[in-house]
Amino acid sequence: MRKLGLVVLLVCALSAAAQNLSPEVKEFVKVDAPVIALQHVHVIDGTGAGAREDQTVVLAKGKIESISSATEANVPKDAKVLDLHGYTVIPGLVGMHDHMFYPMGNGIYGEMAYSFPRLYLAAGVTTIRTTGSLEPYTDLEIKHNIDAGEMPGPKIHPTGPYVEGKSSWVLQAHKLTGPDDATKFVNFWLDQGVGNFKIYNFVTADELAATIKAAHARGAKVTGHLCSIGFRQAAELGIDDLEHGLLVDTEFFPEKKADQCPDIPDDIQRYGKMDIQSGPVHDMIVNLVQHHVAMTSTLPVFEMDVPGRPSMQTRVLDALTTEARSAVLTNKLRATDQARIRKRYGTDVSPWPATFKKEMEFERAFVRAGGTLLAGLDPTGMGGVVAGFGDQRELELLVEAGFTPLEAIHIATYNGAQYLGELDKIGTIALGKQADLVVIKGDPSQNIEDIENVEIVFKDGIGYDSAKLIESVKGMVGSR
């Protein structure tokens, strides 16, 4: 009798998570059972090791219970078995520059509180860092509702509002009045529940130093999309991470003045001509590695400025409102307009193709030097980078940049989890870790474009229907 009681308690515990999901979330659950066996699947574990063929992965209690050869696996009799011949499982992606907002035009951004959480999850992004917030209370409520099982979406590491200076053009950002204000700002938002901060273009060195000191005192981290401060100076001050890579570092320009963001019309052309392998840029890379500063790659947002690419996918355009779709296509046409290019850059040839390749070269050099590269999408720019789809595109672009598919997956899983301090729970497929997994048709270790073929996304052992999540927000991005 006692044994029966234990069994009942166990079954209740195994199904507790699913029972706590709201009807809105249950609508998207495709696989839900106390024990699940993913049979005959390729496993890419996120460590950078090669794919293992014909494996069986058993999930129980929301965690990974076993991983073994399918021929040797001991599958529990009560397990729900999924035959996954021709499929690959990878760790859930960890998106490290994944905003909840989208450009609405004229410098205003709208919160996509309904569509973006669904799209992130649908694409296999099971954990995100918001990396700058314009509606921090909304982001915190989204996190709360997802954690409570009231809405579908990824696990969220919220970032506070942008830490910005007085000269900022960002209407929706608070402008600091000095170091004391920075300290108060950080402590206030830490009290609200954020765990990360993002420095923006116009802060002073004193404000950055105060931000870092206050954040580190309470275990939070600071990243930055810098302009008024160069990368090496930020590293000396103790910053943890830098966003976007070479194309936002102004320290190499002779016009640069202390604590000021220079207005340099031809900066994109200059970046495209920089020497990555020696000289100041190489020295900057070495300096960042020595200071253990991470770098977040956001190649999709830069790619939008390259004439002729990317090819706008139907799935991306279908996700947008009619107005947003029209704006994106118009912006893409403007990027190829020769009169506009000539007026802006003084040449008939856009400098963006060469500059985009230079950014890719920089990211490869940073990793070769021992740097930790993170992966994100940054759904801003001209509006063609959409939550989830952009995260997948980031992996494809990392491979184009020269990383192997296995290295790209490692960057987008293991590295993000490690930076967030979550590597003991997520980031790799290993015994005892949370069952945050992505089931993909095909093999992205051989063809990285297969990363787009997501069918089931497991979060804490519950499998969500990717196609159904995407269908639920068609025509909504740019509105909600």
Image (cartoon, rainbow, N blue to C red):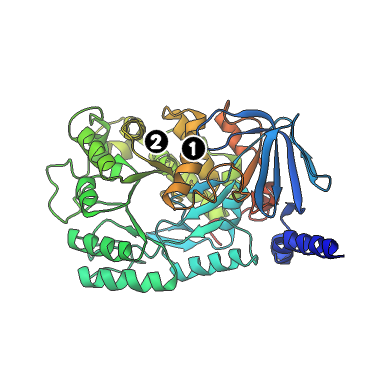
| Residue at numbered disc 1 | 410
Position of residue 146 measured from the top left corner of the image (x, y, whole percent)? 60, 63
Q: Are marks 1 and 2 in contact (CB under 8 Å)?
A: no
Going 23% across and 31% down the picture, which residue do you hit?
274
Is residue 178 visible to us here?
no
Going 23% across and 33% down the picture, which residue do you hit?
282
Mark 2 Cα-neighbour bin, 10 Å: few <14, some 14–19, many ≥20 = some
| Residue at numbered disc 2 | 306
Going 25% across and 53% down the picture, which residue do you hit?
238
Element on which disc 1 rests: helix
Say whether residue 400 is left or right of residue 232.
Answer: right
Say whether residue 16 is left or right of residue 377.
Answer: right
Is residue 449 visible to us here?
yes
Q: Residue furthest right?
A: 1
Report the quarter where the N terminus lies.
bottom right
Out of 246 and 185, give the one closest to the viewer: 185
Cα distance between the residues tagged 1 and 2: 27 Å
Mark 1 Cα-neighbour bin, 10 Å: few <14, some 14–19, many ≥20 = many
Position of residue 352 measured from the top left corner of the image (x, y, whole percent)? 34, 35
Quarter location, residue 6? bottom right
